[in-house]
Every structure is written in structure tokens, then in C-alpha cells.
Amino acid sequence: MSSQTLFKFESQKVAKPYFVFALMLFVGQILFGLIMGLQYIIGDFLFPLLPFNVARMVHTNLLIVWLLFGFMGAAYYLIPEEADRELHSPKLAILMFWVFAAAGVLTILGYLFVPYATLAEMTGNNILATMGREFLEQPLPTKVGIVVVALAFLYNVGMTVLKGRKTAVNVVLMTGLIGLALLFLFAFYNPENLSRDKYYWWYVVHLWVEGVWELIMASILAYVLIKITGVDREVVEKWLYVIVALALISGILGTGHHYFWIGAPGVWLWVGSIFSTLEPLPFFVMVLFAFNMINRRRREHPNKAAAMWAMGTAVMAFLGAGVWGFLHTLAPVNYYTHGAQITAAHGHMAFYGAYAMIVMCIISYAMPKLRGIGEAPSNKAQIMELWGFWLMTISMVFITLFLTGAGVVEVWLRRLPESGAAMSFMDTQDQLMLFYWLRLISGVGFLIGLICYLLSFKKSLQTAADDRPVPLPAETA
């Protein structure tokens, strides 16, 4: 079967290794998450071989890196089609894949096998101190490597867009990707003053996930919906512009909800609270957008699983990033909940709903074509994939609910004690063991769902040719 019947441009194939490696890292992230879940219950599990702080560092770093691989793969797949031309340099894309993959693997191995202080000495942290901060633990050479990869990536996709057709989808995507790269530069700025450090640290952590990443998510979702529904591009673009405007207005000033207790001026109590209440709006509009496009569809696309991922992304992002974010974003509430397990509940569902699901959505849509199967895998493969969708999604809902319950009890015992004497941190943790056990069981359910999702790719190749959907001609939308 000729690849030309499956997608428009040969260079779109460079997305495949990015997608495959992203899923490999996703498996690693979940495994380390389960190890951490056990360490919450059995404090010395795998100690000293794998201390909790190292497991957490690997878990969060794998999350960030696999999502970045997913975003890059998505860009390499959809930008040639949106720009209506071949990718500027497929060879550069493959070279940067190996550079990024090698840097990521070596960094994780460094975390696991070299004491962190020794790793800092070995990698020049004394020259430019950038290590030791949550989510930005990467050694200096890794951070420099990320910048090099990001610049080469932006050059590659940027030249493709500049020489080709400009659409709302690729312009919004490029805006998000450029913002992602520029904001990462604050990872190199590490002031000695802790308040200033945290002030700029959130420029990376918050403005990534509640700012420019939302643009990336919205553009990928818009692309998939155009392809699977056949709705006029002009209609999709109008929705996209509304989502982008709401995301930027609320997300940028909403950064203030991280400035409540770090020594920043008191005005942030008001700015952070007011604009944080607006942050659920772009996600709510995204729900309306996704379901409206599905209801107005002009074609029945054979890839039902991709459509389910698209709708699920919108709903779960609204619940995780919107509703659960709003629960503890107001300053008078955050005064009590700050640092409790409620934050972890919000983080888990938000990252899964907004970003993990959109990456799996574009993979679900693109991989059948990239693997030469057609527009969609077999019915059996899609059933397996939908099992994965529901197991992961339901498990994440339970993880969020159990962590929320743990957070409420934690706040009650430590910060709202009836006796007037707050319970100690460790005594409080003993009271939360039931929630931690239930969270761990839900995590195992999530892993089973991920395995089903991965097995669906194997299932699609085992299907007889007459059970495969007939590929349609390359789409021109």
C-alpha cells in the first residue's frame, strides 16, 4: 500500500519516531508513579536504591519530556499538511530526535545512578547554577541541549509555515511553540533571593501549562476535529480564536495565584484570585467547541477512537484544569489548602486531561496512516483502544477523587483542628493511608488502561486485510 494514499506529504513520516518514543517515556512515567504510590504507604520501599525524591524527579521529568516529544511529533505531522508543502528539513527533524532522545535518556540515568549533588558538580552547576528546582532539575548540559533542539525544531517548522500556507491552526500552534521555547529560557535564571526565584520560576511552570501549552492543545484539537468531522475550516477557526484569547488573558494574569505566599506584593492576592476564576473559561469553551463540531460533522470518519479522544480531552481538561483548579485558586481558600494533596489532585487530572489526552488523540488519528493501515485501525483494534481510553480516564477520575479526599482530611487535621492544636505532618499522613491505598489501586488500573492502549497498535497489524477500513484519498481540507 503506497503511503501517498494515506497522507499528503512524505515528510510527515518523521512524526512516527517522536510518537513511539513519547509512548515509551509515558510507560516509564506511570511505572515511577506507581513506585511513588507504594512509597507513600511503605516508606522504605526500594530505599536506599531509589529514594522518594529521585522517583518523584524521574516521574515529573518523564511527564514533561514525553509530552514535548508528543507536541513535536504533532507539529511535524500536521504542519506540512496545514502549510500544504513538505517539511523544510526531514533530516534535521530526525537528527534532533536522536539528540533529544539521547539527552533525555542520559539525564534520567544520571538521576537514577549518580547522587544529585555529584551530578551537579559533574555537569557544571558551579558555572551556572540552574539545578535543584522542582521540575527544572535537569543538569546544565541537558538544559542547553533542550534549547538547541528547540531552536532547530522551531527553525524547521517555522520555515515550513513561512514558505507555505498560513492557517489559524498552524499560526496558533507556532505561537504556542515559540512561547514554549522562549519561556524555558527562565530555567537558566536562578536568583539567590527565594522570592525572586519563585517569581520567575513560575514563568516556566505556570505559563507553560496554563498559557502557551493551551495554544498547542487547542490547535491540535482543531486540526483533528477538522479532519474527522469535515466541518468548514472557517467555523473551527472562529472557535479557535476565542479559545486562544481566553487562554492568554486568563492564563497570563492568572499566574498571580502562585504569588500569594512567596513575599510578592499584596496586589497579587486580588489579581491572582480574580483572573484565576476566569481560567476555566477557555476549557469550558473547548468542551462546547468539541461537541459542537462532532454534532455538526459532515462525514462519518472511520476512526471512532480518535473522535472519542478529542471529546474526552475537552471534558477532562475542563474538569481537571478548570473545575479542580478553581477549587483552591482563591486566596482565602488557598490560605488553607496550599501544599495539600488537593494540589496533587488538580495536577494529575489537569495534565492527563489537557495534555496527555491530546497527545494520545493525535497519535490515535495519525498512527494508522503512518503505519500504512489506512484512515483507521480495525474495529477490534479500536475496541481495544477504547478499553484503554475508559480504563485510563476512569482510573484518573478516581485518583483525583481520592487525592481530593486526602487533601480535605489533611487540611481539616493540620490547619482546621477542632482542638485548637494542629496535628503533625507525619501523624496526618497516617490518617490518610486509606486514600493512598485507593489511589495506588487506581494507578494500577491506569497502567492496565495504558497497556490496552498500546496493545491496540499490535492488534491493528494482526487484522486481516479485508477487516481493515478502506483508505480514502488524501484529504485536502
Image (cartoon, rainbow, N blue to C red):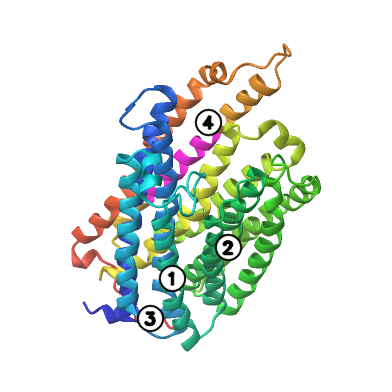
| Of callouts 3 and 4, the N-terminal one | 3
Q: Position of residue 438 (x, y in %)?
A: 45, 27
Q: Nearer the viewer, mark 2 or mark 4?
A: 2
Contact flag, marks 2 and 3 (Cβ < 8 Å): no
The residue at the far top in this view is 419
> SS for tag 2?
helix
Residue named by callout 2: 212
Residue named by callout 3: 87
| Of callouts 3 and 1, the N-terminal one | 1
- Answer with left or right where residue 283 lies relative to residue 435: right
Q: Amino acid at mark 2?
A: Val
Q: Nearer the viewer, mark 2 or mark 1?
A: 2
* CA–CA distance in space, label 2 to label 1: 14 Å
| Of callouts 1 and 4, the N-terminal one | 1
- Answer with left or right where residue 69 lies relative to residue 236: left
Q: Nearer the viewer, mark 3 or mark 4?
A: 3
- Answer with left or right where residue 62 lies relative to residue 201: left
Regarding residue 98, the answer to whether it shows in the image is: yes
Query: Badge 1, how many Cα within 10 Å: few under 14, some, many 20+?
Result: many
